[in-house]
Image: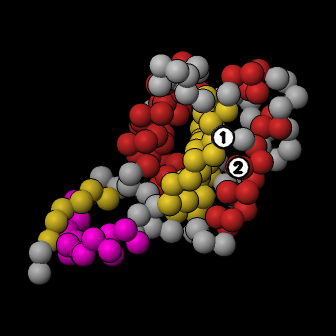
Amino acid sequence: KQWYQRRVRGNLKFSEIKPPELLKLEMAKFITVNSFAEYLKAAESSKSTCSQIFALFTGSLTASGKSWCPDCVRADPVIEEASKSLPSGTCFITTYIDRPTWKDPANEFRKGDLKLKSVPTLVKLGSEQRLVESECAKKSLVEMLFEED
C-alpha cells in the first residue's frame, strides 16, 4: 500500500493513496452562480446531496479580473485556500454580486432569510454562523467556520 500525509485540524494523518476516480468522490462540490435566483436554485438542489452547505457572497469580477469590492479581493484567496480542505459531501456555493445590484438597498440579498449587510459574507447554511467583511480574510476564522459542527 502507498501512503501520504495530510493535515487534518492541525495534525498530520496518514492515509492510503486512492485511485483518481475515488479521489474525485472525496472532494467538496463547488458551485458558482451570478444571481439571487441562481443562488436559491443551487442552495435548494444542494440540500438533498450535501451534508454541509457553505455560501460565499462576494463582489463580481471586473474586466481586470479582480472584484470591485476591496474586502473581497483580500478575502477571496484566503477562502479559496481554506476551502480546498472541505470534506466530501460538502457543497460550496459562490455567488458573485455585481456592484449596481449590491448598491441597491432593495436588492434581494439584503432581504429575506439572508439579510446580508456586507460583502464578502461567508455563511454556513442551516446555522447562524457567518463571517463578514474583514473576518473573511482571517485564515483562522475561515478554517474554524469550516471545521465546526
**Residue 123 as seen in the image, left or right of residue 19:** right
- Which span is picked out in magenta? 11-25
Looking at the image, is mark 1 or mark 2 earlier in the sequence? 1
Q: Quadrant of the C terminus?
A: bottom right
Q: Is residue 56 magenta?
A: no
Residue visible at 45% across and 67% down? 88
Residue occupied by mark 2: 39
State the residue in front, 16 or 69. Answer: 69
Residue occupied by mark 1: 34
The kind of residue on which mark 1 rests is Asn
Tell me the number on the disc at residue 10. Answer: none
Mark 1–mark 2 Cα distance, whole angstroms, equals: 8 Å
Q: Is residue 21 above or below residue 59?
A: below
**Residue situated furthest left in the rendering:** 1
Name the secondary structure under disc 2. Answer: helix
Q: Nearer the viewer, mark 1 or mark 2?
A: 1
Residue visible at 48% across and 33% down? 76
Q: Quadrant of the N terminus?
A: bottom left
Residue 125 pos. (x, y %): 67, 55
**Residue situated furthest bottom in the rendering:** 1
**Residue 74 as seen in the image, left or right of residue 5:** right
Residue 8 pos. (x, y %): 32, 59
State the residue in front, 110 or 8. Answer: 110
Quadrant of the rendered image containing residue 99:
top right
Residue 110 pos. (x, y %): 81, 34
**Residue 66 as seen in the image, left or right of residue 3:** right
- Tally of numbered tags: 2
Name the secondary structure under disc 1. Answer: loop
Q: Is residue 30 above or below residue 45?
A: above
Q: Is residue 47 visible?
A: yes
Residue 60 pos. (x, y %): 60, 30
